[in-house]
């Protein structure tokens, strides 16, 4: 199984913490965040990881190398001089992508089986993606997804209405063809892909049971350190 980590963000919200350090390498509970994330992926059965990098990406290469220290095979895709967005980063990495892959964010830590969305997609060839979701109801962040049964029927990154009770959990399994249909070097967000698939009825939902964690804010860092520091 293959996982793709989007780790090219500028992390401007964290100020001095990330002025000279990529967000993926922020120390969390005494270790670089990326180490926690890679171990979680390995526990879930992943053997291949593609890292989409840009801002201070060489530091990530220096830390991880070929991935052998985590029992993983690692490849890298450079975003290039022009930022292409989360979807554009995947399009640039197209030659490295498996026919079906899992994509997650370089600042998300998810206490669930990362392989579950990918296995769900493989079991449902009529779909083009399976998005992990959490019934958030606005608790941890703004909810953005409407789910009916096992299908995401609407995804709105900036939605507000009460029907959007679920939130994108931070891990989505996709068919490579969904990314290949975009022109090379095009700039677009992964949210564009999610919205389009939901409108087509091609995006399945996998419900996670525990809250998500992220290191994109000071509060998020504190919450994750509390989780990972608990014996």
Image: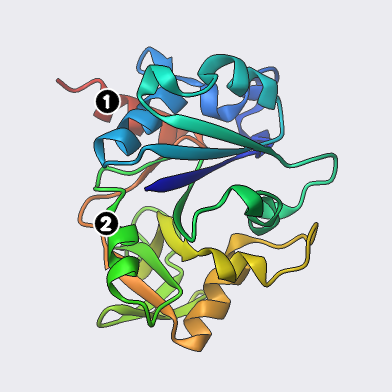
Residue located beneath label 2 in the image? 116
Q: Position of residue 53 (x, y in %)?
A: 65, 35
Q: CA distance from mark 1 to mark 2?
A: 22 Å
Say above or below: 83 vs 118: above
| Within-10-Å neighbours for mark 2: few <14, some 14–19, many 20+ | many
* Location of residue 143 in the rendering, given as x and y in whole percent from the top left corner: 42, 66
**Which of pointers 1 and 2 lies earlier in the amino acid sequence?**
2
Which quadrant holds residue 57? top right
Secondary structure state at the residue bearing disc 1: helix
Residue depicted at x 57% and y 29%: 23
The answer to whether residue 28 of the structure is visible from this angle is: no
- Which residue corresponds to the image point at 49% horizontal and 61% vertical from the top-left? 99
Say how the picture is coloured. Answer: rainbow
Instruction: Name the residue nearer the viewer: 134 or 192.
Output: 192
Q: Which mark is residue 228?
A: 1
Name of the residue lying farthest toward the right: 81
Q: Which mark is residue 5?
A: none
> Outermost residue, bottom direction?
200
Split into 4 quadrants, where in the image is the C terminus?
Answer: top left
- The residue sitting at 43% across, 59% down in the picture is 172
Instruction: Answer with left or right where residue 92 lies relative to residue 97.
Output: right
Expressed as whole percent of the image width and height from the top left, the position of residue 229 reads 25, 20
Look at the numbered discs 1 and 2 and tell me whether their residues touch, using CB distance below 8 Å.
no
Q: Farthest left residue?
A: 231
Do we see residue 97 in this rendering?
yes
The residue lying at 33 percent from left, 71 percent from top is 205
Q: How many marks?
A: 2
* Element under disc 2: helix
């Amino acid at each position: 199984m293959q996982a793709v980590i989007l780790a090219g963000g500028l992390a401007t919200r964290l100020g001095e913490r990330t002025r000279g350090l990529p967000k993926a390498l922020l120390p969390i509970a005494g270790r670089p965040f990326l180490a926690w994330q890679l171990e979680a992926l390995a526990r879930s059965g992943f053997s291949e990881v593609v890292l989409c990098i840009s801002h201070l990406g060489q530091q990530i290469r220096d830390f991880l190398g070929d991935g052998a220290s985590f029992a993983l095979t690692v490849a890298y895709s450079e975003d290039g001089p022009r930022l292409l967005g989360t979807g554009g980063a995947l399009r640039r990495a197209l030659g490295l992508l498996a026919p079906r892959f899992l994509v997650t964010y370089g600042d998300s830590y998810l206490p669930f089986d990362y392989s579950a969305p990918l296995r769900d997609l493989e079991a449902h060839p009529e779909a083009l993606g399976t998005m992990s979701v959490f019934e958030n109801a606005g608790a941890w962040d703004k909810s953005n997804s409407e789910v009916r049964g096992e299908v995401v029927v609407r995804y709105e990154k900036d939605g507000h209405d009460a029907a959007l009770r679920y939130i994108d959990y931070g891990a989505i399994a996709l068919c490579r063809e969904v990314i290949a249909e975009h022109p090379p070097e095009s700039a677009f967000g992964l949210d564009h892909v999610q919205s389009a698939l939901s409108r087509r009825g091609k995006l399945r939902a996998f419900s996670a049971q525990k809250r998500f964690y992220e290191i994109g804010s000071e509060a998020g860092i504190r919450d994750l350190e509390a989780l990972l520091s608990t014996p």
